[in-house]
Image: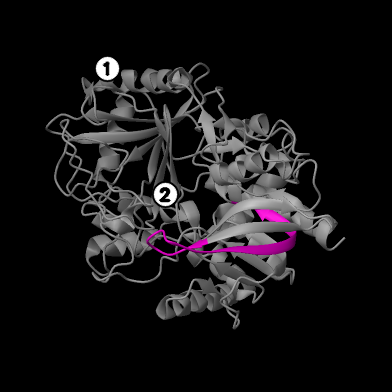
């Protein structure tokens, strides 16, 4: 058993023990339930960059505290499930909402996907900013709890374009392979794919793309594809094949609480405090940082406001969370030396959702895996590059609907401003900035529709629009590498303050971004450990 596997085993035991005892403090040691007054290293958030950073800090023997505003998702509810069904959502579905807000807003113009729910610390959040909404994961594991598990490495040429100051040779030779291995990336068995029920919908879209001259590629995944095969065979409880996607996955997904975070806990040096939201960062005269932290319960009641001080502060709260913390700190005078790049360079990764109506002789199937395994790769198009995930519609009935989430090359960038009245960051993004993404998706799917004599669906997004570009699953930027930070995520203007999440990436990766976020965090923490902490 490797060191990573041993640590992961110990960490999983700690997570299960905390769940069984109803604890919000998670550790392999007998850590005090109260927030400590001081910790040498502190990581805000438990998403991809935060998890990779915490693991390497723990391995280096650095006592590390992680603060997560969401809850720990390992305790079954009254129905015996940790996560609620997507087709019958309850309070577990969304972060303090009165009604679910699914991306597919309607079917035949009827709102069949959404339900009224009790307000609760649910797993999926949708933050609305006028012309743009952002989906986020809430809980120990962050976005890994609610994404489609598509573990894609960007094309090297595009990576070199978006992050020219990062050594691509090192990334593709060392850090991307390391991230994929620790995340548990695997691929679907191509032979099984050709005959299974779970991916009939993907084969229908593949055939339609081929008729238009477009190729498709298998997409690596952090869903256990062997478990999926056994799901379809009826050998194990169904999860991806039980329509579990956006509100969490109960069985086969290798989310961060089962990989990086478990291994980090297993070092014996990392502690996670759930339901603790960082509100302010104060810079002390001795160079340390004091965080103002709000503890809540699962119903949103504020239980206490606490303070914890650290020498090395790592922000891994995501593009929205980390950016808001630094923007608030700059505009309130807590960290006045932060530069003007804080809050800038934000993008949607060019996300556009759309649907096509298939012919009656091309059914997509009543059983659909919620974890995509195939994409249409048109990134080589010199005018309208796009990578389109073939997405499921796991409704349990035949819909003759092919759904896609296109990732496009959109040069438009938004920025955040601080709103003192609400004490929050507000995104400045206009509807017109989504037009390059819509144009790229339209160029691809117009050709597919012409080749197949099919049409778009006009009934999916609450009105008659075909292309839904008013939300993103992949928020990126706000604290761009080399601008708000140095080339390794060190925040300019302050020592021992770091960013370690998707806010470092300037708005686009051309593919699902979590492997890139993880690999970049691996690269950065290796340098920080060598020069700032051990040096």
Image coordinates for residue 373, horizontal then vertical, percent: 38, 46
Q: Does the CB distance between marks 2 and 1 fall below 8 Å? A: no
Label 2 vs 1, first from the N-terminus: 2
For residue 156, side relative to residue 244 (left or right): right
Report the front residue among 201 and 294. 294
Image coordinates for residue 190, horizontal then vertical, percent: 37, 50
Report the front residue among 209 and 32. 32
The span shown in magenta is: 295-316
Q: Name the residue carrying label 2.
A: 147
Quadrant of res 354: top left
Secondary-structure class at tag 1: helix
Prevailing SS of the magenta stretch: strand
Residue 450: mark in rendering = 1
Residue 229 visible? The answer is: yes
Is 226 placed above or below 478 here?
A: below
| Quarter occupied by the C terminus | bottom right
Image coordinates for residue 455, horizontal then vertical, percent: 22, 21
Which residue is drawn at the image coordinates 36% and 52% (left, top)? 96
Q: Residue furthest left?
A: 360
Quadrant of res 449: top left
Report the front residue among 221 and 423. 423
Total marks drawn? Answer: 2
Q: Residue furthest bottom?
A: 30
Which residue is drawn at the image coordinates 25% and 70% (left, top)? 235
Q: Magenta stretch containing residue 288, yes or no?
A: no
Between the residue at mark 2 and the residue at mark 1, the CA separation in whole angstroms equals: 31 Å
Density class for disc 1 (Cα within 10 Å; few <14, some 14-19, many ≥20) is: few
For residue 496, side relative to residue 168 (left or right): right
| Quarter occupied by the N terminus | bottom right
């Amino acid at each position: 058993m490797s060191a990573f596997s041993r640590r992961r085993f110990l960490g999983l035991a700690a997570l299960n023990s905390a769940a069984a005892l109803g604890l919000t403090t998670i550790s392999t040691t007998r850590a005090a339930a109260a927030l400590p007054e001081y910790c040498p290293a502190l990581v805000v958030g438990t998403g991809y960059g935060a998890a990779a950073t915490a693991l390497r800090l723990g391995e280096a023997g650095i006592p590390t505290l992680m603060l997560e505003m969401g809850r720990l998702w390992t305790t079954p509810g009254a129905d015996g499930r940790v996560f609620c069904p997507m087709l019958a959502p309850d309070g577990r579905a969304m972060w303090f909402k009165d009604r679910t807000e699914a991306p597919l807003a309607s079917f035949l113009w009827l709102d069949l996907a959404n339900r009224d729910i009790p307000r609760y610390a649910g797993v999926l959040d949708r933050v609305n900013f006028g012309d743009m909404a952002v989906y986020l994961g809430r809980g120990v594991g962050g976005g890994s709890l609610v994404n489609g598990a598509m573990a894609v490495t960007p094309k090297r040429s595009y990576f070199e374009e978006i992050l020219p100051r990062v050594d691509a040779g090192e990334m593709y030779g060392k850090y991307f392979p390391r991230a994929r291995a620790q995340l548990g990336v695997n691929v679907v068995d191509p032979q099984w794919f050709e005959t299974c029920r779970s991916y009939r919908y993907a084969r229908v879209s593949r055939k339609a793309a081929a008729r238009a001259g477009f190729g498709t590629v298998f997409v690596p995944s952090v869903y256990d594809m062997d478990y999926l095969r056994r799901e379809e065979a009826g050998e194990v409880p169904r999860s991806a094949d039980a329509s579990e996607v956006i509100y969490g996955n109960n069985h086969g997904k290798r989310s961060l609480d089962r990989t990086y975070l478990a291994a980090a806990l297993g070092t014996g040096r990392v502690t996670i405090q759930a339901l603790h939201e960082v509100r302010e960062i104060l810079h002390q005269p001795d160079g340390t940082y004091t965080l103002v932290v709000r503890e809540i319960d699962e119903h949103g009641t504020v239980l206490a406001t606490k303070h914890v001080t650290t020498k090395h502060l790592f922000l891994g709260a995501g593009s929205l969370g980390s950016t808001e913390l630094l923007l608030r700190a700059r505009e309130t005078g807590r960290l006045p030396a932060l530069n003007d790049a804080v809050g800038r360079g934000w993008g949607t990764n060019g996300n556009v959702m759309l649907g096509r109506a298939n012919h009656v002789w091309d059914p997509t199937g009543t059983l659909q895996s919620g974890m995509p395994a195939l994409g249409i790769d048109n990134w080589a198009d010199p005018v309208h590059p796009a990578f389109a995930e073939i997405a499921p519609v796991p409704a349990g009935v035949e819909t003759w609907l092919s759904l896609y989430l296109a990732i496009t090359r959109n040069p438009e960038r938004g920025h955040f401003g601080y709103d003192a009245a609400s004490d929050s960051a507000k995104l400045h993004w206009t509807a017109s900035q989504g037009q390059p993404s819509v144009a790229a998706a339209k160029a691809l799917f117009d050709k597919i529709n012409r080749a197949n004599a099919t049409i778009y669906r006009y009934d999916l997004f609450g009105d008659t629009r075909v292309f839904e570009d008013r939300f993103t699953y992949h928020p990126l930027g706000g604290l761009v590498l080399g601008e708000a930070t140095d080339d390794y995520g060190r925040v300019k203007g302050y020592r021992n303050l770091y960013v370690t999440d998707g806010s470092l990436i300037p708005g686009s990766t051309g593919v699902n971004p979590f492997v890139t976020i993880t690999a970049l965090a691996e690269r950065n923490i290796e340098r920080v450990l060598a020069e700032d902490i051990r040096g």
